[in-house]
Image (cartoon, grey):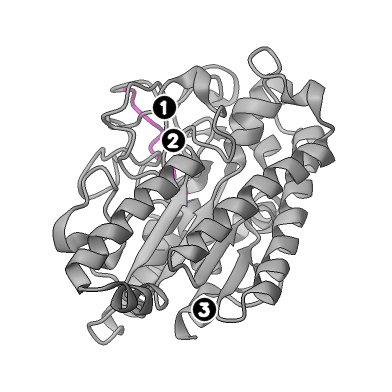
Amino acid sequence: MGESRALILIWVVAMVMGASGDPQVPCYFIFGDSLVDNGNNNRLSSLARSNYFPYGIDFPQGPTGRFSNGRTTVDVIAELLGFDEYIPPHAMAGGNDILRGVNYASAAAGIRDETGQQLGARISFGGQIQNYQNTVAQLVNILGDEDSTSNYLSKCIFSIGLGNNDYLNNYFMPNYYSTSSQFSPQEYADVLMQEYSQQLRTLYNYGARKVVMIGIGQIGCSPNELAQRSPDGTTCVEAINSACQMFNNNLKSLVNQFNNEFHDARSIYVDAYGIFQDLIERPASFGFSVTNAGCCGVGRNNGQITCLPLEMPCQNRDQYLFWDAFHPSDAANVVVGRRSYASESPTDTYPIDIRRLAQL
């Protein structure tokens, strides 16, 4: 284990141990894609699954359906919020377990229903919200009435991390999808935001009051896109990153709109794009030596596909920014999760970080 990661782990454990027994919020609800899926796709007829070795090689429970060698960013955030267990996937959550929150994320999912369809079954943002609505009905039964449930949910954190696949597995895949011929990049970002905004209102109507909107990362710098579109295998794909920034700008504006419209709620924006840019531009500062290739995978940059079953990954996993063709390593997720929880740069989160949101 690298020294930098060992120090981070000690810091995380200290934060959790110092959390006076109770988490900082009663529950944490998670919506997203493969970056935070922790097992919801395991039973689906989908190519977007990771419940096999070497996924989970550094995770205590082994392969769980997480697209990482270890934790995801929301696992790290859950630790920092003081939860003594990770938030369960919807596919396995039941009974009183749902009182501490549920993870609804699904690999290949997007804001648009059709996104990711070439990979098989997945649970879109709309489907994830339907699952959450079912959870709220269960909470009403557990807590006794709607008022008690609303009061309980108003103290919880809700995080949304969607949009990556609407680009990777939709807009920039013209052989399967027509969106790039229908919309300019800015028009597409606007269309995505209209749908996102509607889903956000539904969440509000079902009790969400503390909402974390996580921007999309530098997709054009992923090993997969470098393998396919970069002339030298290291220069990020500007057309993709530019489109991502349009989406993120809209998302940050949505945070302002939401906060102005709903005075009993508070939303924040996490600049995953900027945090990742920091990791790519100053990798040595974070203990990384490889930023353009997956720790496991196939082909150029190990970026052609995700890890193959039983493939032996790289040994120095802490030094790899990416675990596979698309997904960050545990070490990278620790940095992103930590800076989402407690911003280390003025631009990491807006207008406040998750730690302060939890205190409201």
Q: CA distance from mark 3 to mark 1?
A: 33 Å
* CB atoms of marks 1 and 2 within 8 Å: yes
Indicate left or right for 270 with 101 as reference. right
Does residue 85 show up? no
Give the label on residue 107, or none.
Answer: 2
Q: Is residue 187 magenta?
A: no
Mark 1: amino acid? Ala
Callout 2: few (<14), some (14-19), or many (20+) C-alpha neighbours within 10 Å?
Answer: many
Res 15 → quadrant: bottom left
Residue 300: % across, % down: 60, 19
Q: What residue is shown at x 70% (from left), y 28% (from top)?
A: 171
Does residue 360 show up? yes
Q: What residue is shown at x 51% (from left), y 22% (from top)?
A: 117
The residue tagged 3 is 357
Q: CA distance from mark 1 to mark 2?
A: 6 Å
Q: What secondary structure characterizes most of the magenta part?
A: loop
Residue 278: % across, % down: 68, 57
- Sequence order check, earlier mark of 3 and 1: 1
328 or 290: nearer the eye?
Answer: 328
Indicate left or right for 331 with 94 as reference. right
As helix, strand or loop, the secondary structure at mark 1 comes to: loop
As helix, strand or loop, the secondary structure at mark 2 comes to: loop
The residue tagged 1 is 48
71 or 354: nearer the eye?
Answer: 354
Residue 253: % across, % down: 75, 62
Direction top: furthest residue: 175
Magenta extent: 311-318
Mark 2: amino acid? Ala
Task: Determine whether 108 is above or below 132 in the image.
Answer: above
Res 358 → quadrant: bottom left
As helix, strand or loop, the secondary structure at mark 3 comes to: helix
Task: Determine whether 213 is above or below 63 in the image.
Answer: below
